[in-house]
């Protein structure tokens, strides 16, 4: 990540960035689920053995949080204002302890804001990929990004 901010004008449709890998830790996965998503197959290794997954799996919300942590490494230099929507959110494959996950961000579309001249609307496809190159999380996100200030 660079210290220079990238503005709406700097983003190119079709550009793709990918993070390094983050290894999923069982203890962190369990702690998150116990606090925020206490389904038995997320919080109890013994009971999870009788689930369709055969073992504890990460909560989908935790998986999204892991994506966000990794995405900050590759998109943290963008002059974000905020995200305004997630669309087509999918968790096609369970995340398990020991998985090594990489975030990918692809700029799909962009346009100037209809109501605010200081910003643009950027559509991104976000993907989280495991060590086998299988997708474990994906969504399209609509975001507001600052336009380059006249003084920059």
Image (cartoon, rainbow, N blue to C red):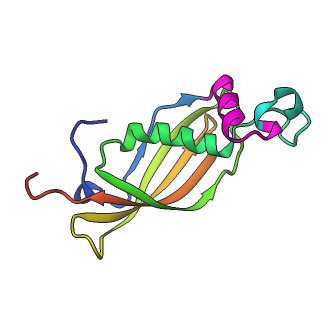
Vertical placement of 147 versus 92: above or below?
A: below
> In which image quadrant can residue 3 be found?
top left
Would residue 31 be counted in the magenta stretch? yes
Characterize the magenta stretch by its predominant secondary structure. Answer: helix
Viewer-closest of 138 and 64: 64
- Taking the view exactly as shown, the residue that stands out farthest to the left is 151
Q: Is residue 88 left or right of residue 148?
A: right
Rendered location of residue 5, percent (x, y): 23, 45
The residue at the point 55 percent across, 38 percent down is 66
In the picture, the quarter occupied by the N terminus is top left
- Taking the view exactly as shown, the residue that stands out farthest to the front is 35
Rendered location of residue 80, percent (x, y): 33, 52
Vertical placement of 40 versus 45: above or below?
A: below
> In which image quadrant can residue 139 be found?
bottom right
Would residue 149 be counted in the magenta stretch? no
- Taking the view exactly as shown, the residue that stands out farthest to the bottom is 114
Q: Which residues are magenta?
A: 24-41
The residue at the point 45 percent across, 37 percent down is 19
The residue at the point 9 percent across, 58 percent down is 150
Rendered location of residue 141, percent (x, y): 48, 59
Rendered location of residue 61, percent (x, y): 63, 45
Q: Is residue 5 left or right of residue 86?
A: left
Vertical placement of 21 versus 117: above or below?
A: above
- Label count reads 0
Vertical placement of 91 versus 39: above or below?
A: below
Viewer-closest of 80 and 67: 80
The residue at the point 81 percent across, 30 percent down is 44
Q: Is residue 45 left or right of residue 36?
A: right
Q: Is residue 30 left or right of residue 54?
A: left
């Amino acid at each position: 990540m660079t210290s220079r901010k990238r503005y709406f004008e700097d983003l190119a449709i079709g550009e793709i960035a990918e993070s390094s890998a983050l290894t999923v830790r069982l203890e962190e996965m369990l702690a998150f689920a116990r606090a925020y998503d206490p389904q038995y197959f997320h919080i109890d290794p013994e009971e999870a053995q009788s689930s369709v997954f055969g073992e504890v799996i990460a909560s989908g919300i935790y998986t999204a949080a892991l994506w966000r942590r990794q995405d900050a490494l590759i998109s943290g230099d963008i002059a974000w204002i905020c995200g305004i929507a997630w669309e087509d959110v999918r968790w096609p494959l369970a995340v398990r302890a020991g998985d090594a996950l990489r975030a990918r961000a692809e700029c799909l579309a962009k346009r100037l804001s209809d109501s605010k001249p200081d910003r643009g609307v950027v559509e991104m496809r976000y993907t989280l990929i495991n060590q086998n190159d299988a997708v474990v999380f994906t969504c399209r996100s609509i975001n507001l990004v600052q336009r380059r200030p006249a003084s920059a």
